[in-house]
Amino acid sequence: MTRILVVDDSRTVRAAISKILSSHYEVLQAEDGEDAWQLLLQNPNVALVISDIMMPNLDGYGLICRIRASGDDSVKSLPIVVITSADDDITRERAHACGANDFIVKPVDFGALIERADFHTEAKLNRAAAGEPNQQGFAEVEVTVVETPDINSALEIIRGVREGSIAPYAIDLCIEVLPLLEYCERTFSLGIAKEIKAIKDQLDKQAI
């Protein structure tokens, strides 16, 4: 099965994209550019990189430049699809200038993602010979990715400003809120230390 590397600092975004692609591809996940680079060195048979732009440690631009400067021709020539919430011309031009082959703006539906992945790999030809897999069950993933492209949109849903599901971003929201809860507990002695610990323990289980 064709192997794709998905790079995004949000684990829920990685999980959503991976679920979309997993029936068609073997998916590796990386949380930032540095992590992605190490995975590329360890997995020379990766056929496509799908990467976010804004990430800690090494951002998408830096990852693209490092790939294009590689002394390994198989790495240097890897097709790269950039996925980002930024749709301005400067971001698009910079991504292409660094060496990106394609550019998709969030929110992304699963059909567009599969289409771009097929275009840059030979997986579609292989599947055509074996018969297309059943795509039933992807609708829910598509809706959550489209309706909730980022945490700010999830907060808008919570506030009632817009409609949609926050399920894909529940973990990220908890992570964002925890420091505030801990500060309030230290400052105002709210008596929620056990609840905070329980949330942390549950998040640790989710990460395993």
Image (cartoon, grey):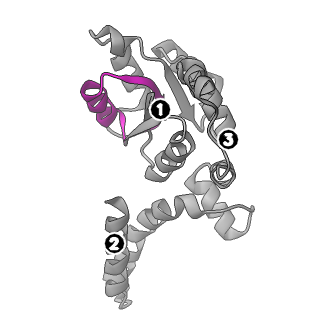
Query: Residue placed at 65% from the left, 69% from the top?
Result: 158
Amino acid identity at mark 2? Lys
Residue located beneath label 3 in the image: 109
Kind of element beneath mark 2? helix
Asked if disc 1 and disc 2 are in contact, CB closer than 8 Å, the reply is no
**Residue furthest out toward the bottom:** 191
Residue located beneath label 2 in the image: 200
Q: Is residue 169 above or below residue 27?
A: below
- How dense is the environment of label 3, judged by Cα within 10 Å: few (below 14), some, or many (20 and up)? some
Residue 33 magenta-highlighted: yes
Q: Tell me the quarter of the picture where residue 189 sits.
A: bottom left
Mark 1 → mark 2, Cα distance in angstroms: 28 Å
Earlier in the chain: of badge 1 and badge 3, it is 1
- In this view, the residue in front, 118 or 151, is 118
Kind of element beneath mark 3? loop
Residue 125 in the image: x percent, y percent? 59, 20
Asked if disc 1 and disc 3 are in contact, CB closer than 8 Å, the reply is no
The N terminus appears in which quarter of the rendering? Answer: top left
Q: Is residue 36 left or right of residue 94?
A: left
Query: Residue placed at 40% from the left, 32% from the top?
Result: 59
Residue 145 in the image: x percent, y percent? 63, 49
Residue 124 in the image: x percent, y percent? 59, 24
In this picture, which residue range is highlighted in magenta? Answer: 31-55
Kind of element beneath mark 1? strand
Amino acid identity at mark 3? Asp
Q: Is residue 42 above or below residue 181?
A: above
Earlier in the chain: of badge 1 and badge 2, it is 1
- In this view, the residue in front, 27 or 56, is 27
Q: Tell me the quarter of the picture where residue 109 sits.
A: top right
Query: Residue placed at 51% from the left, 13% from the top?
Result: 97
Residue located beneath label 1 in the image: 51
